[in-house]
Image: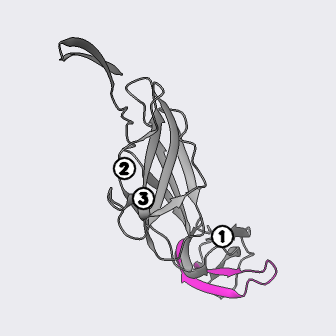
Amino acid sequence: MNYYFLCIVGGILILLNVVSQATVPRCTDLRATKIQGTKVFLSWTVPTPTIPEVIQELDLRMSTVPITSLNFNSRTRLTLLTDPGTPGSTQSVTISNLSLTTRYYFALKNSGVTGGLPQVWSTMSNLVESITFGATLPVTLAWDQNPESDVIGYKIYYGIVYEVMDQTVDVGNNTSVEISGLEYDTRYYMMVTAYNTASLESLPSTIIEVTP
């Protein structure tokens, strides 16, 4: 936007054309939408300028200490996504290969240009934080109750080899269980059986695959 001013210098009337600096709206809804092991999924709405302006570049930063406007430029820049997207649309990105059981902070800025002016950066977005999981994760299983009247309990069999589910958990007369200590990003095969008062087991259920 241009502003014009009249001033008198040495008795001469001069028209000054002063170009104001563009302002770029900041993102206000950055959020960690999901955590999966050592991955964090971020999403946000691309800001919509209030004046004719082109949103030009995205600067997404990550840190293990809170990010502020003062230390923003010294935090780790994530270059896997630099296209800011279309104003008003939802952007998302997956941050992978993070450290286990670690608190991370994320913030971003957008740059823009208008009227041929130099590139201008927005102020920092809202700050979000997310904690990655540890090396092991729990998994919750649930199943329908066996209709036989003499059923008194259930057993879970699981393992990392389809033909050798060598881990067993007797869950008693419950129809759900949380199995802990499973290794992150490892495929497990699991099935359930019912047993009766004579300690006879039913045929196994359908085998499922679980990857924490």
Task: Give the percent coordinates (x, y) of residue 95.
Answer: 56, 60
47 magenta-colored: no
> Residue under circle 3?
73
Question: Do the residues bearing badges 1 and 3 touch, measured as CB atoms within 8 Å?
Answer: no
Label 2, secondary structure: give it.
loop
Q: Quadrant of residue 198?
A: bottom right
Mark 1 Cα shell of 10 Å, populated few (<14), some (14-19), many (≥20): some
- Magenta-highlighted residues: 152-178
Query: Mark 2–mark 3 contact, CB under 8 Å?
Result: no
In this rendered view, identify the residue nearer to me: 116 or 158: 116
Which class describes the residues within 10 Å of circle 2: few (<14), some (14-19), or many (20+)? many
Q: Is residue 135 left or right of residue 14?
A: right
Identify residue type, mark 3. Asn
Residue 119 x %, y %: 46, 38
| Cα distance between the residues tagged 2 and 3 | 10 Å
Camera-side residue of 180 and 39: 39
Q: Which residue is mark 2?
A: 124
Q: Quadrant of residue 120?
A: top left
Q: For residue 155: magenta?
A: yes
For the C terminus, the image quarter is: bottom right
Residue 46 in view, yes or no? no
Q: Residue furthest right?
A: 163
Q: Is residue 33 visible?
A: yes
Nearest-to-viewer mark from 1 and 3: 3
Q: Residue at x 60, y 80 (%)?
A: 182
| Label 3: how many Cα within 10 Å (few below 14, some 14–19, many 20+) | few
Task: Compare marks 2 and 3 and give the one earlier in the sequence.
Answer: 3
